[in-house]
Each structure stands twice: as C-alpha cells, then as structure tokens.
C-alpha cells in the first residue's frame, strides 16, 4: 500500500551521536606509532600495451615512524586567482591531516618552493639542512615526463593552466606556505629534494604521503616530488582529495576543471603510485548528506527506496539522508534539500516542474556533484527532455514489453570494474528492458540486459558529467529491491559516485 502523503520531506535520523549536529564528535587523538591505514587505489593495465586499465583497491598499512607527509607548494598566494582560492579551500583539511599524521608519530615536511628565505634560521628549516648528506643518488631539480614509464599527461597545460577569464598574469606571488597550515616544532621545512631525502635516510623513512599542488606540475616533477621519490625506491601515495591541477578548461580535453584533476589523478594511479583519501586518516568531517527525490507513480519507490535508504545507506554506510517525496506531477516541495547535498539520488518520472523547482536540479548537475538515477529518472522531466542525454549519458526511447523477463550480465569490457564487486555474475530482473542506446562517449556500460530476441541494452552505466560522477540503472521495479544483486549494485553505484572505496564482499565462512 502506498504512503498516503501528497508531498513530504523526511530527514532520516542517524544515531544520537550523529544527529546532534552536522559533525560527529571528534575522535580521540591516536596513540603515537599506531598504524596508518589506507585504502589505496591504483590502475593496472589489463594487458601489455592495451591501453585498458582496471581499478585495483588494496589495504595499505604504514608504520608512522617510517612515514612522512610532504605538503607540496601550498603557497599563501598563487599567481592564478582560481588556484589561490582552491588552495585556500583545502588548506584547513591539509592542516588537519598534518596534525593527525604528526599525532601518530609521522614526520611532516612543509615544502613551499622558493620561499626558504621566509623560514631562514628556524629550527624546522635547520632540521632539514643539518641532516647528513647522502651522495650519488641521482636527485635532479625537475623530473620531466618520462616516456619510458608513462604516457603523455591527459590534459593540455601548455598555457600555464589558469582557467580564469581573462587569464591571470604569471608572476611570483608567494612568500610562504599558506598560513592555515601550522608548522609545528618537530616538523621540517625544505624545498630541496636532496635535503628531504637526507632527512628521510637519517630517520629511516620509507613511506611518503603527498598532498598540495599542483599534481600535473610540482607534485609530480619537483626534486622532492612523486617521480623522484618513486625512482629512489620509496613508497609513495597521493592524497587525491587534497590536491589540484593547473588546468584551463578551454584547453584539451575541454572538460571542467575538476574533471581535469580527476584525469591527472588517474594518470598518477596508472604510472606512478596509488592514491588515497584524507578520510582514511581523518574520517569524514561529517556524514555525507544524501538528498533522495522520489516523484513517480508507477514503481512504489516511496516504499522500496525509502526502505533501502534506511537499511543500506543510513544504518550500514552512515550516510545522512533526506527524502523529498511528492505524488504531484507539477509540484515537488522541499527541493532546497538538493542545494546542500553531497549526493543526489533520483527516482522520478515525467514531472513538469516550475522553473524555480527545476533550477534546483539544473544548478546541482552544473556543479559537478555526484548523482545516482534509478529507472524512470531517464525521463524525469517533461520540460527538460534532454536530461537523459546531457546528464545521464544515454538516449531513452521507451521499453520492451513488460511481460518478457530480462536476463542481465556484465558488459564484456567492464566485467572487472569495482562497480560490479559483490555481484555474482548473471541474474534476472522483473523490470522491463529499456532502450537507452546509444550511450554518450563519456558513459561506460556496466551491465547489459536482454529479453527474448531483442538486442542487448545497457541496464547500468557510469558517466562523467561536468566533472561529476553519475550512475544510472534502468532497473528498479519492486522485486528488484528484494534482489541482493540489485541492492549491491545500487550500493556500489552510490559509493562510486561519492568516490568511496567499494569493498569486496565479506568472505563466506
């Protein structure tokens, strides 16, 4: 039986500790020398020279006494105004990461290049300068792209990478590290790869964690950067949510800035080292907010998706969910919840919304935030018919007969994708098969469905839209929500959209 409301907004509460505010109580400071644990993501080529890579995630555990965090070129001011703004936004989180690594017993190295005069004579500067020299290790001032190891960068940064309009004038704007990052008494300050390597050798440091800017330039190329330390045999990890690129979206491959950063991060994962999230060390600053919009009158989503959100997203994943639900075809009150959401989940069908309400969806998708769409959401809006193409990356053209059962199997080219982890291979669905091909070039088919003698159609796809991650599945009939395969698929899609690790299923006893 359907819920009797016309429209309602429900905030699904978490446990008392999480509901008392946006942020959970801060964790107790870790004991010095307790292990640093990461979920490290890399990309392995499936066959030599194939150009096809699969994502591999593995647990990494580092001894803090053998670990250093290098904060690369997080200057107080950059010549590019956009870069200055983005650095300022990440600086408090970088400081929190430094505090946590320091509390574990790791070494923090502040490396704001070309600002050593500011730190001259300080104990932190002397700490790096006074380490015994290690000679004949081949450290060079700048490590260019190495064709023997890596492909060309996936972005064109030859214009300097400023994406402001007009572009900013290039000059030396910096004088020190960003003041939001504290240089503690036991930290080191250096912009010299030789000095930093000397200090690492003196202290027995074998593991290097990187954050700061810019990934395509200094983080990779500096004398203390990833390429150099990797060549010296050190273990390296990049904190992918605490870095940025110098990339102008008006240059090839003509994608939003955030997507350009993602492409460079994937380059690092392919050729140099795995990447991790700062939340591996810090936890999340608050539970991610998920806005779930239900506005359809065919599949009982107000019951099935609500139960799924409570059991899977809230209780198991600890996400903070707000349900916006309406039975009206022309009015969905409460869409303001979308504006502050970290993830939007949609189960909608053929709504004609007023411009003010539709604009919530348009602003959200333009921002590049993650989106998960279910079944009829490909035709969610009567007054935004191109939504399926420009956001989801598909072309909805109706569906085959409802009475024909659907058989589902992984798409051959994506069978090893983490998005399909925990699925046991082929399964059946009660949903009718949608016709959504052809897909946009940005979209990747994950699962294919067939019924009777009809052509195979994608039933789950991953897309990159305006730099953001979009997961869409044409499944979602009520029996699908009772199927562990579908529930796992939808959970994986939500984790992927949020850039969270997708764990392998628990081993069977």
Image: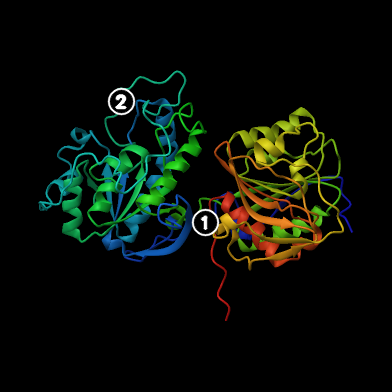
Give how far across and how far down residue 77 sits, in percent: 34, 29
Q: Quadrant of the N terminus?
A: bottom right
**15 relative to 241, above or below:** below
- Local crowd at mark 1 within 10 Å, few (<14), some, or many (≥20)? few
Residue located beneath label 1 in the image: 25
Describe the element under mark 2 as helix, strand or loop: loop
Q: Is residue 188 left or right of residue 325?
A: left
Q: Is residue 273 left or right of residue 293?
A: left
Which label's residue is closer to the chain start, 2 or 1? 1
Task: Name the residue nearer the viewer: 406 or 375.
Answer: 406
Residue 179 seen in the figure: no
Task: Name the residue nearer the viewer: 240 or 486.
Answer: 486
Extreme-bottom residue of the structure: 509
- Count the marks: 2
Q: Is residue 498 left or right of residue 199?
A: right
Q: Which mark is residue 173?
A: 2
Instruction: Determine the CA span between mark 2 and mark 1.
Output: 38 Å
Question: Picture quarter containing residue 386?
Answer: top right
Give how far across and how far down residue 289 sits, in percent: 62, 48
Q: Quadrant of the C terminus?
A: bottom right
The residue positioned 39% from the left and 62% from the top of the image is 30
The answer to the question of whether label 2 and label 1 lie on touching residues, with beta carbons closer than 8 A, is no
Residue 373 seen in the figure: yes
Give how far across and how far down residue 463 sits, in percent: 60, 44
- Mark nearest the camera among 2 and 1 is 2
Task: Name the residue nearer the viewer: 347 or 119.
Answer: 347
**169 relative to 121, above or below:** above
Give how far across and how far down residue 39 sits, in percent: 45, 60
Describe the element under mark 1 as helix, strand or loop: loop
């Amino acid at each position: 039986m359907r819920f009797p409301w016309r429209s309602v907004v429900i905030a699904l509460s978490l446990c008392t500790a999480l509901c008392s505010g946006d942020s959970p109580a801060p964790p107790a400071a870790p004991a010095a020398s307790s292990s640093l644990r990461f979920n490290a993501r890399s990309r392995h080529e499936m066959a030599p020279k194939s150009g096809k890579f699969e994502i591999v995630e593995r647990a990494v555990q580092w001894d803090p006494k053998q670990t250093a965090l290098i904060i690369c070129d997080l200057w107080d001011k950059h010549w590019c105004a956009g870069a200055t703004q983005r650095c300022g936004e990440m600086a408090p989180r970088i400081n929190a990461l430094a505090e946590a690594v320091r509390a574990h017993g790791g070494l923090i190295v502040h490396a704001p290049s070309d600002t050593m005069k500011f730190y001259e004579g300080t104990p932190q500067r002397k700490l790096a300068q006074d380490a015994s020299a290690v000679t004949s290790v081949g450290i060079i001032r700048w490590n260019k792209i190495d064709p023997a190891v890596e492909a060309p960068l996936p972005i064109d940064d030859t214009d300097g990478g400023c994406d402001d309009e007009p572009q900013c004038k290039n000059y030396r704007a910096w004088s020190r590290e960003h003041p939001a990052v504290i240089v503690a008494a036991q930290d080191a300050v250096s912009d010299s790869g030789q000095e930093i390597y000397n200090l690492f050798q003196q202290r027995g440091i074998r593991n290097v964690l990187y954050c700061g800017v810019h990934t395509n330039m200094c983080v990779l190329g500096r004398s203390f950067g990833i390429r150099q330390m990797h060549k010296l045999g050190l273990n390296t990890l990049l904190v992918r949510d605490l870095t940025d690129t110098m990339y102008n979206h008006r240059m090839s491959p003509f994608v939003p800035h955030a997507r350009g950063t993602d492409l460079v991060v994937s380059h690092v994962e392919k050729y140099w080292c795995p990447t991790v999230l700062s939340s591996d060390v810090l936890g999340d600053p608050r539970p991610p907010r998920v806005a779930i919009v239900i506005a359809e009158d065919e599949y009982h989503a107000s019951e099935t998706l609500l139960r799924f959100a409570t059991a899977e997203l809230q209780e198991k994943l600890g996400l903070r969910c707000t349900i916006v639900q309406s039975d009206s075809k022309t009015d969905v009150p409460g869409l303001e919840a979308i504006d502050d959401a970290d993830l939007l989940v949609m189960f909608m069908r053929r709504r004609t919304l007023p411009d003010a309400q539709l604009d919530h969806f348009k602003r959200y998708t333009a921002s590049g935030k993650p989106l998960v769409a279910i079944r009829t959401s490909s035709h969610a809006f009567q007054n935004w018919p191109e939504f399926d193409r420009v956001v989801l990356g598909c072309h909805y053209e109706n569906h085959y007969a409802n009475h024909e059962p659907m058989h589902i199997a992984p798409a051959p080219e994506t069978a090893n994708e983490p998005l399909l982890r925990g699925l046991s291979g082929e399964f059946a669905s009660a949903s009718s098969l949608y016709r959504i091909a052809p897909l946009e070039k940005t979209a990747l088919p994950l699962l294919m469905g067939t019924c009777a003698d009809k052509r195979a159609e994608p039933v789950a796809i991953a897309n990159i839209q305006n730099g953001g991650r979009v997961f869409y599945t044409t499944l979602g009939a009520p029996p699908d929500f009772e199927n562990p395969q579908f529930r796992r698929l939808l959970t994986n899609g939500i984790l992927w959209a949020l850039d969270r690790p997708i764990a392998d299923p628990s081993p069977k006893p």
